[in-house]
Image (spheres, rainbow, N blue to C red):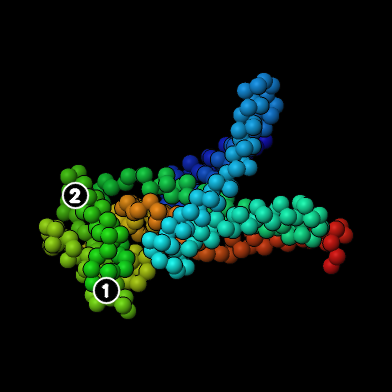
């Protein structure tokens, strides 16, 4: 029952965070805690409940806990192979494959440690499992909240639509991924106009990479104009080299044109929540919406996005990982379980 009380407290913090700012990463963590503790409390209640139905539900939960990691690992491995075939073999396309292999490796390590009976190997396995569990919890929390945030519509009253750039094909042409963002940006712009917004403007944001002949902003503007979008409603931000610079430089344009304005930021669906976190960090008054991407691309992209967010809070995360490592090892050393 204590787990349910903690779950309720975590959920209350989640709701408070949503009211304060939906773009906060802490919202994902509190939601993940509420769900995990709620599931634990539910399992405790089932264990204390007599009857065949309760036993059956406990069995189903146990099977999910046991088989879930293997199913996820299998999916990630298959997705990783698909990514490598369609997108080529490079670090970014191998993330889901490596994540699937990592899950299998941790499970195998647990099984080996249990059979071998080595104290040191068991301690190492316990620490590895705890660290992996911590990172996995954060990742699952991130994915769940990113899914929720991506479905929150907050367009009303915006003065700008900001479409974030990505790489160009052959250094000058809009890629399918970027075209999806631009079409989504056009939809948002038209929705604002239909809703009575007073002359919204659309900012295309993206600088010129070393392998590009024109800036991403120029290629994006040309794409929209060729398809009938009014050139007079377009603004070009052509200096940025990263998502954070996209947002900072677009904010500067908005502050100069219409101080205190609000915006809707458009990017790919896997990139929405990290963009929202960055928008909050740079002080941009806007929410983020996502354009659809190919389903096979999503798992690796989400892993990459989560890794970037994890590293942006590296002091806290590495501190927790260090604590997870030091405490069991220190306890074992103090009690003579292992030699020092």
Q: Residue at x 46, y 61 (%)?
A: 304
Q: Report the residue at 35% width, 59% height from top.
A: 284
Position of 67 compared to 326: left or right?
left
Look at the numbered disc 2 and give the secondary structure of its residue. Answer: helix
Which residue has dot 1 on it?
Answer: 171
Q: Position of residue 204 (x, y in %)?
A: 24, 64
* Count of all numbered marks drawn on residues in the image: 2
- Residue at image position (62%, 52%) is 133
Q: Is residue 265 left or right of residue 46?
A: left
Judging depth in this view, the residue of 113 and 340 nearest the camera is: 113
Q: Is residue 274 visible?
A: no
82 is higher (above) or lower (below) than 155: below
Crowding at dot 1, Cα within 10 Å, few <14 / some 14-19 / many 20+, comes out as some
Nearer the N terminus, badge 2 or badge 1? 1
Q: Quadrant of the C terminus?
A: bottom right
Q: Measured from the top left, where is residue 259 in percent x and y?
A: 26, 61
Residue located farthest toward the bottom when viewing the structure as drawn: 210
Q: Quadrant of the N terminus?
A: top right
Name the spot of residue 177 as percent of width and height, x first: 30, 59
What is the C-alpha distance between the residues marked 2 and 1?
29 Å
In the structure shown, which secondary structural element does the residue marked by tag 1 occupy? loop
**Label 2 Cα crowd, 10 Å radius (few <14 / some 14-19 / many 20+):** few
Residue 247 picture quarter: bottom left
Q: Look at 57% across and 58% down and name the residue there.
A: 101
Left or right, residue 142 beside residue 127: left
Q: Which residue is mark 2?
A: 190
Depth check, mark 2 against mark 1: the one in front is 1
């Amino acid at each position: 029952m204590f787990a349910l009380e903690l779950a309720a407290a975590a959920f209350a913090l989640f709701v408070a965070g949503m009211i304060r700012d939906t773009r906060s990463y802490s919202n994902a963590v509190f939601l993940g805690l509420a769900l995990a503790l709620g599931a634990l409390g539910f399992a405790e209640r089932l264990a204390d409940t007599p009857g065949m139905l309760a036993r059956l539900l406990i069995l189903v939960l146990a099977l999910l806990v046991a088989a879930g990691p293997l199913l996820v690992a299998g999916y990630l491995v298959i997705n990783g192979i698909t990514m490598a075939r369609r997108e080529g073999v490079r670090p970014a396309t191998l993330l889901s494959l490596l994540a699937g292999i990592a899950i299998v490796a941790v499970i195998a390590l647990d099984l080996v440690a249990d059979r071998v009976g080595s104290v040191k190997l068991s301690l190492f396995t316990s620490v590895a499992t705890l660290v992996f569990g911590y990172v996995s919890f954060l990742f699952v929390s991130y994915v769940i909240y990113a899914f929720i945030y991506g479905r929150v519509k907050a367009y009303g009253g915006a003065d700008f639509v900001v479409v974030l750039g990505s790489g160009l094909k052959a250094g000058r042409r809009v890629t399918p991924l970027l075209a999806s963002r631009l079409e989504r940006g056009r939809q948002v712009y038209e929705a604002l106009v239909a809703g009575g917004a007073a002359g919204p403007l659309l900012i295309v944001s993206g600088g010129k990479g070393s392998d590009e002949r024109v800036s991403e902003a120029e290629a994006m503007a040309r794409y929209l104009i060729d398809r009938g979008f009014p050139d007079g409603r377009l603004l070009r931000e052509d200096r940025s080299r990263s998502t954070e610079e996209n947002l900072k430089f677009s904010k500067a344009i908005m502050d100069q044109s219409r101080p205190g304005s609000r915006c809707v930021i458009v990017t790919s669906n896997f990139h929405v929540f990290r963009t929202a976190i960055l928008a909050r960090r740079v002080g941009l008054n806007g929410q983020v919406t996502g354009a659809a991407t190919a389903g096979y691309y999503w798992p690796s992209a989400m892993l990459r996005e989560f890794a970037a967010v994890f590293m942006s809070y590296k002091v806290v995360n590495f501190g927790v990982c260090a604590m997870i490592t030091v405490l069991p090892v220190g306890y074992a050393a103090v009690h003579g379980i292992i030699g020092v």
